Image (tube, grey):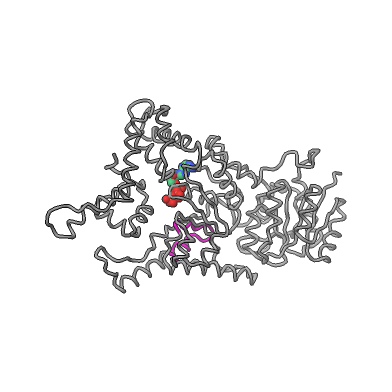
Amino acid sequence: MRKFRILIVCPDPQGLALLTSMLKSLGHLIEEASTDRGAVRLMERSPMDLVLASVDPGESEALELLSYTRRKYSEVPVILMFPRAHPDRAKEALRLGAMAVLKYPVPAAELRAAVLQALEQCQPRAADGRAATPHAGLSSRPQAYAATAAAPASSQGVAPANLFAMPMSFASPARLPSYGTPGLQSMDPVDGVLRPVDTPAAFPTSPARPAPREAELVTTDPGLRQVIELAATLAGTSAPVLIVGEPGTGKSLLAQILHDGGGPPDRPFVVLRAGDLEEPEADGEGEEPEPAARRGAAASALTEWARKLDSARGGTLFIEEVGALPAEIQLQLQREFQYRDIEVAAGRARHNSQPGVRFILSTSENLPAAVEQGRFRPELYHRISALSLMVPPLRLRGTDVELLAEQFRARFAHEFHKDVVGFTRDALEALQKHEWPGNVRELQGVIQRAVSRCSSPRITSSHLTPILNLQRQARAAAGTSGPHVPMGIRPLKEALEEPEKRIIIQALQAFNWNRQETARVLDINRTTLYKKMKKYGLLVDEPIWAG
Ligand SMILES: Nc1ncnc2c1ncn2[C@@H]1O[C@H](COP(=O)(O)OP(=O)(O)OP(=O)(O)O)[C@@H](O)[C@H]1O
């Protein structure tokens, strides 16, 4: 019989001794550790085949050993034991790849059955002690996403179903043929109820990943690849993550990666544009809004917040441009974090309460400056910025311009039914020279227009130069020039509409029709911009004035 090496981790010496004596009769080698640090040392010294750890689910670092083991030894199964029900933590543990979460203390026969079942999954070890054929586990995700640029879409991001990512309680009996010990229970992460492992639970039994979306985050840049890998690692956690980067760099796509990797594919992913909740501002004549209008707007912002929060339960709420959240909603968000802290501190199980929400936030503005200026709550900033991912601007991403230009060329050629097969060398040079202040969104818009105008097989610099020049001019105008006041006497309001419209168009063009960024540069809120665009008939998808 092959002897396996089992690591038992338990902070309580009596518990440790008891667990060891329960498993001794199996005839395997048992190593003991009373702390995570001790466990890591033992794992570094000799490879383990199974980790069995008793942890307090109320501790903030309860899952650290699990994360470490999954990251470093993805083939090693981990069974956790919780002395009390903690559905959120159990759910998180299963997402991170725990093989099972058991109630501690667990009867000897049941513990032995669980351990034998886990060991059955073990691969024979190679001479260096690593599993010869490691299971494709959660650790394969980072490569999957980072490989996006090189691999065709159909081969990306879809980790094969693997047993270690599948909680025992949800594995079908067919996949666990010898796991027949009646009465062995695993904690259901949804309701915290202990159920026999062979009882089908009301939860997806297949860990199938979603099909790759059309918009994948494509890059060859090593810095951005690292960010994507980190995002994939953080995907399994419920910690808030702040994504920082210039407009149009791909923050939304990164948010989607953080969401997708973290659980069943049908969880909600709800987007909230913070600017959409803005309070009313002074009108064109500088008059303050009526108190009634203020109260009405504040109330509708709160209602919208509650609605989004509710629809994101059990999934993710992605708050775009978090710096634009109205003060009242900042407070609400902070409270959400405080409630969570209180629950964790009290070790309270959310038996009958609603499922939690994972927050992902993005910003293109300098949030520390917003804190300094008193526009953003410092406590909230510290809370959301503990885990920050920085997305580099396109101009610093080396060959990404070429790679993305080619991808957009292919997409738009297909969409417009045009035989545009590539770029000439001078066209590529023109693309490389441009600064891309609007980042990937700007590049996408430029290539879209170039393809639509191109009547030759390749896009040349003569297709691109006018579009790029227009981008530059429009941006310069939006940034520097003031309104051109027309001559002639007319009612003031009417006379001011013309330059206002022109400035808005210029700014929209300069920022590739990104309303958030346009509103920011014009120093108005997004609602006001939206109203003005509507008034001037600018609410169209494709700018007819462009070039
Ligand atoms: N690396 C990329 N590969 C492919 N498409 C990309 C990439 N980065 C961005 N895009 C595309 O560029 C556009 C802008 O991306 P996205 O909305 O994610 O940026 P953002 O940083 O969230 O922008 P904003 O802050 O202005 O909301 C989208 O159409 C997106 O699909």
Residue lying at 81% horizontally and 48% vertically, measured from the top left: 46
Q: Left of 213 or right of it: where is 495?
A: left
Q: Left of 483 or right of it: where is 88?
A: right
Residue lying at 29% horizontally and 70% vertically, measured from the top left: 288
Nearer to us in this view, 201 or 246:
246
Q: Magenta segment, which residues?
A: 305-321
**Residue 513 percent location from the top left of the image:** 35, 48
Give the residue at the far front of this rendering: 480
**Residue 350 percent location from the top left of the image:** 60, 67
Nearer to us in this view, 401 or 526:
401
Residue lying at 37% horizontally and 29% vertically, measured from the top left: 460
Can residue 528 be seen by looking at this rendering?
A: yes
Give the residue at the far left of this rendering: 489
Nearer to us in this view, 529 or 66:
529
Can residue 214 be seen by looking at this rendering?
A: no
**Residue 59 percent location from the top left of the image:** 68, 65
Of the 4 image quadrants, the one containing the C terminus is top left
Give the residue at the far top of this rendering: 457
Give the tally of numbered discs. Answer: 0
| Quadrant of the image occupied by residue 55 | bottom right
In magenta stretch: residue 171:
no
Task: Give above or below for 170 relative to 405.
Answer: below
Give the residue at the far bottom of this rendering: 291
Of the 4 image quadrants, the one containing the N terminus is top right
Task: Give above or below for 269 relative to 135.
Answer: below
Q: Left of 404 or right of it: where is 70?
A: right
**Residue 489 percent location from the top left of the image:** 12, 57
In magenta stretch: residue 307:
yes
| Quadrant of the image occupied by residue 32 | bottom right
